[in-house]
Amino acid sequence: MTDPQIGLTGLAILIALIAVRVPIGIALIGVSFGGLYVLMGPRVAWGAMSIVPYQFTSSWILSSIPMFLFLGFISYHTQLTRGMFNAARVWLAGLPGGLAIAAIFGSAGFAAVSGSSIACSAAMGRIAIPEMMKHKYHPELATSTVAVAGTIGALIPPSIILILYGVIAQISISQLFLGGVVAGLLTALGYIIVVLVRVWLNPDLAPERDTSVSLREKIFALRETWPIFLIMIGIFGGLFGGVFTPTEAGAVGASLACLVAIVSGQMTLDRFLTAARETLTTTAALLIIAIGASLLTRFLALSGAGDFLSEGILSVATNPVLLMVGIVVVYLLMGMFLEPIGSMLLTLPIILPVVDASGWSLLWFGIVLTKLLEIGMITPPIGMNVFVIKSVVGELVKISAIFRGVVWFIVMDLILVAILCAYPDLVLWLPALLN
């Protein structure tokens, strides 16, 4: 028997638990189990605890998550992406803010093999920020550029957020990856525009430009990019060419990364074991949260609270524009306090039925949602990417300075969200073309 009151009470308890810093996975599982116990009795509650985790984790596509994570951690610990930044630095050093633009290009390259915003920011922070400081870049511009460039990691495939969204929304992972390519490239372009405008308005932010680099040096620098391009060609060529599935693409990419690291002399046993250990712990954390979200979906469905909330949202926001603005505001607010995957898995049981009833493309919405979640990675007071950069630079730059610099990029992000909402075909044309 449905009882929306129990479901809504469970959601209120869940929000309270998260507010007092209970780990989101534990909060989701605890509230869902308790709600099912009260609603349907102990047999149903324990039955859900035994069936739902197996049903969710038995999805074959989920096996791509540890593979792509391992690919990213191997690339990070063996510094396979350093050549991408160095090549971009040599080619772009003559532009205003060229090193900052190179950091954005380097982050886009790292994103193509990692799928993690935090790993992207950490890797580029250690490589690009010292180089910019050496050329007298203002610390605010240097740190904020790398912090926001890391968010590209969730849009350009392989993206862990897109994989989880695809599993829950039952959307083709390959199609999501193709949509993410366009959004990721638009994001990189938007960030480059911000850097150019800021340096044009205040040249002291990036006073030094190196215009003495010869064509021979530029061509030689391209030789350093072969590890990333080899991995990218192996993954995307096989994936979009139909040679293997997204699941197999993760395994192929991880194998290629290990092989490239061995050939280039960057692989050691310690680095391999560190990457494997981080992959296991990160995968376990992600799956606990995802299982909790799956249990919450079951609880909300049985209580009737999910339908109650979805119908309530649709009845209040009859205008599609007003509805989308409300969704944007909710995710921006949640991004200030929760990490992206937790925010997504917590809200999808309620938001997906609303999106489906509105007649919107679930593929398009997945890309817009990912973009909104990544804005949360750089907004105060949490801003995980900002704190990653702070840990890299230490006491050299205040956290407030990094957040000040990030504001410029947040404005560009909001403009990009508006563009993606106004012109959904920007996201959908490439998946339709290569379908």
Image (cartoon, helix red, strand yellow):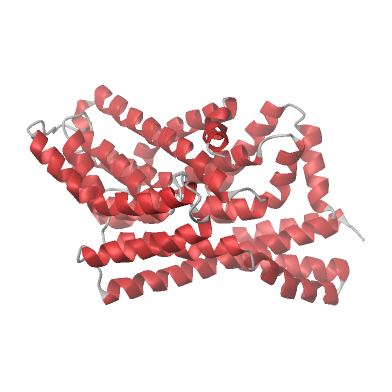
429 relative to 222, above or below: above
Q: Residue at x 74, y 34 (%)?
A: 358
Evaluate whether residue 59 shows in this view: yes
Q: Nearer the viewer, residue 64 or 125?
A: 64
Provide residue 235's location: percent of width, then percent of height. Answer: 41, 53
Q: In this image, 113 relative to 270: left or right? A: right
Q: In this image, 301 relative to 433: left or right? A: right
Provide residue 45's location: percent of width, then percent of height. Answer: 80, 72
Q: Residue at x 24, y 46 (%)?
A: 85
Q: Residue at x 70, y 67 (%)?
A: 55
Provide residue 283's location: percent of width, then percent of height. Answer: 50, 67
424 relative to 246, above or below: above
Q: Residue at x 20, y 38 (%)?
A: 137
Evaluate whether residue 23 shows in this view: no
Provide residue 398's location: percent of width, then percent of height. Answer: 30, 48
Q: Nearer the viewer, residue 50 or 239?
A: 239
